Amino acid sequence: MRIRILLTVASVLMLTLACKKEKTESQLEVQGWCLLSNNEAMAMKAIERAKDYHINHLELSHELVMDLRELRNPDKLSLVNKLIKAAHKNNIEEVSLWDHALYSLEYYPKEFRTGPGGTIDLDNVEFWKWFKQDYRSMLDLVPDADGIVLTFIETGARIEQQYSVKMKTAEEKYAALVDTLASVIIDEREKYFYVRTFAYNPLELQNMIQFVNMLKHDGITVMIKEVPHDFFLTHPVAEYASQINKPFMVEFDCAHEYNGQSIIASVTPQITLDRFEFFKKQKNFIGYVARIDRYGKTSIIDKPSEVNIITLNQAFEKTDITIDSILNQFISMKYGRACIPLLKNVFIESSDILSSTLYTLGLNNSNHSSLDFEHESSYSRHVPVKWTESQLVTVKHDVYKKYHAWKDIVEHLGAPAMKKRVFFENEAPYVLDSNWVTTEEMMDMDYLNDVLIEKENGVSLSRNALRNVIGCKSLIRDSASYYSLYHMYYRTYLTSKLYRSTAKVYFGYRVYSRGGEFALPELRDVIISGLTELKETIERIREYEEPGPVGQYDWVKDTDKAMEYYTHVKFGIMRN
């Protein structure tokens, strides 16, 4: 079996490799990247740049390989093997591939699907023999791959839902799956094996912690996310890491699936550093893997958001690092020392721009970064306090108020269709037990004012950021670097205006539609001004010369959703 050793790494910033410094020994082992897009040119560029960050671990996932069975597609297999070869050639010691188990039930032979409802009979020893042989055949396709990253939650056929008399609990079924795969991946093939955790609610999370702590195979490493569930700025750091008694690494999303995907200002060095420093204090923490793209051409390499992975690199390699030192070096080397006074605040305040634009009083109002004030998960699954003891949140952004997340924020911001009981039954049943949320329309002027104050804060911050960027134009010698920065922050500014005007229209009309004391003439004026601003912003976005890369998030298509709100509200307000 392969055994990890502590690696000696240079504690220098990627951009200052030319300046030789004495090497120091890191107490961590894994410094990794994860590639999601099947864009070959972009992947090759990342692999070539990996040496600048001393990357020793590379994961291929999502569009490249989400399930190992996909490698039976010759084109996909060819690209994956090509990237593995290129990574090894560029001195990346380990390339691991993603997999999910189980696959859909239809994948497995009928003779094993004899449990209730056509589920797999896990007590059938022949199934496990077949399962192991099937895995061997898939691994044979990628002989040079060094490891497997397995997710067994959010899969086709979930293992805990399969039939067994002998295995009474979900944890026992998890163990059977993982132990069987470990016998092939580690014992037979001598490859790395990562068990990637994922949970939708705290109960699932506790079950997962209990399970991973029961794992007995010494070769298994646990992989967790930087936050519980998904990568939201307002989520707490994954404090449960302190309960894991196995070696674990942390998955960071530096390309920001939910926060702009580097099309707008997905620049969060302070949040990244704070979270990393928390994990660094945990006794079983061995390193990180950073997602560096979100499909298409959204790689953060050579973009302003590259500062996110520079932050991780510096925090990994140095024992005492500050956000000031990170930004001073990054700005100096990429844009010029003269830009530090103007750009440092731009990068520091970008997280506030995002959290007051894409979020509303702490709730994410986008769907994988795309504008959506009626994304049902925003009001149930993605509520941050699901993962904290306190149900109270404090919102800054010029609002400066403390709210009860459910009784105040969800109850008022969520439209009746977003507050159906079914949404809370599995995600947060205690909300129903406590009668914190009703299915009534509760949006009112007080909450509308708070929302608009916050959205105005986002516009103000993004406008100031753009001004500072423009102020650096004559100081930045490389025009490509300047325009990449400029266009990112101009798109951010337009996005903040789009969310502000949409909030006026969407939330304002919900209050107005309650009629009676809520249908105030001054509120009607707010809505009409929002409609005017919304239409103008839609036109500016659609005509903008540099719409940026397209990943899962297509920036220009936000205008389609905004136009839906515009059309619905204009028709309604004019009718009244």
Image (cartoon, helix red, strand yellow):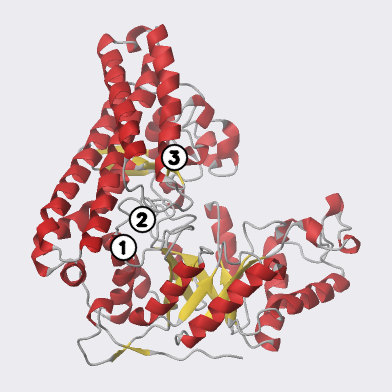
Q: Answer with mark 3 or mark 1, whichever residue precedes in sequence.
A: 1
According to the image, label 3 marks what residue? 557
Task: Label 1, secondary structure: give it.
Answer: loop
Q: Is residue 244 left or right of residue 334?
A: right
Residue 433 versus residue 397: which sits nearer the camera? Answer: 397
According to the image, label 2 marks what residue? 262
Residue 108 on image: x %, y %: 82, 63
Task: Label 3, secondary structure: give it.
Answer: helix
Q: Give the quarter of the image for residue 370.
A: top left
Give the residue type that dot 1 points to. Answer: Lys
Residue located at (30% from left, 81% from top): 317
Residue located at (60% from left, 81% from top): 145
Q: Answer with mark 2 or mark 1, whichever residue precedes in sequence.
A: 2
Residue located at (70% from left, 78% from top): 141
Give the residue type that dot 3 points to. Answer: Lys
Give the residue type that dot 2 points to. Answer: Ser
Q: Answer with mark 2 or mark 3, whichever residue precedes in sequence.
A: 2
Q: Is residue 74 left or right of residue 395?
A: right
Is residue 545 positioned above or below 160 on the image? above
Residue 461 on image: x %, y %: 19, 44
Residue 322 on image: x %, y %: 20, 70
Is residue 361 positioned above or below 117 on the image? above
Q: Nearer the viewer, mark 2 or mark 3?
A: 3
Disc number for residue 303:
1
Pointer 3 and pointer 1: residues touching (CB < 8 Å)?
A: no
Pointer 2 and pointer 1: residues touching (CB < 8 Å)?
A: yes
